Image (spheres, rainbow, N blue to C red):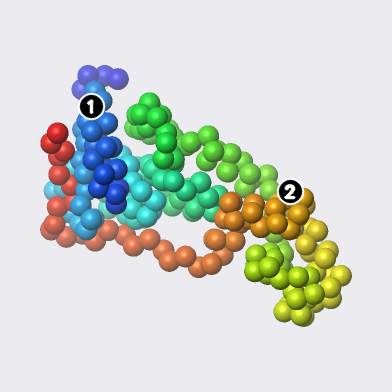
Amino acid sequence: MPEDVTVRVLIAHSDPLMSAGLAAILTAQRDFKVMVCNADFEFDSMERRSLSQCLAVADYDCGLRLAASKGAWGGQVMILTHSDSEAQICRALEQGVRGYLLFGCSTRELVEGLLSMHVGGSAFAPVVTSRIADRMNREALTAREEEILRQLMLGSSNKRIALELALAVGTVKTHVKSILQKLQAKSRTEAIAIAQRQGVLQEKLGCPQPRAPRLGSRRLWSPVIL
């Protein structure tokens, strides 16, 4: 990297211990300038200019909030989280998140990921890439199949589902067979486990939209002093 290039990184993680660890790791890297935001996500116009083109390492919720406010600060977001839910990953990508790593990643993965984002690339953990591929290759469930899958998650029998949805038992069996095929599951129990792991129905539950940071006079960040 050229000597006059500095990678500015904003740490926006809700866990203070995680923030301190990230700050220590990145501050030790050549060409990295590290800042840590406060919990209010408020900043004035001068600080907003300082954050221009800054990269952010954030937990899931903070990452979505920063991505939603990209027009206010102009940076790119890397989420560092424990969640490998397909639905959450896809939601983050739809918000414009350019990096998604999981707890347990190496320092090298974190640093190289940020360097990739700094030059316009992206940074995704292998399991994240796998989840995206699964989504692209999987045939979507129909609205009726989603209804029946919800009933399966509640432990309902085919007869109970038929009564709940005013369907013939044979029709329910046909839908269940289709669900198993689409989720590549061998049993109802496996289908439920796959659906829960991949978050197949989570995106249908009306999750609240992330709140964008407010513009104000409080400081968003401060240089890390180690």
Residue 9 seen by the camera: no
Vertical arrangement, residue 76 with respect to residue 68, above or below? above
**Secondary-structure class at tag 2:** loop
Residue located 58% across and 51% down the image: 197
Vertical arrangement, residue 215 with respect to residue 165, above or below? above
Kindly identify which numbered label has been placed on residue 28. 1
Task: Locate residue 203, reporting x and y percent.
Answer: 54, 61
Residue located 36% across and 44% down the image: 77
Residue linked to disc 2: 184
Task: Locate residue 192, reporting x and y percent.
Answer: 66, 57
Marks 1 and 2, how far apart at CA: 46 Å
**Left or right of 58 in this view: 216:** left
Residue located 71% across and 71% down the image: 156
Task: Kindly identify the amino acid type of the residue bearing the numbered disc 1.
Answer: Ala
Task: Kindly identify the amino acid type of the residue bearing the numbered disc 2.
Answer: Gln
Vertical arrangement, residue 17 with respect to residue 106, above or below? below
Residue 102 seen by the camera: yes
Task: Locate residue 144, reporting x and y percent.
Answer: 72, 68
Task: Locate residue 7, reporting x and y percent.
Answer: 26, 31
Residue positioned most to the right: 170
Precedes in sequence: disc 1 or disc 2 = 1
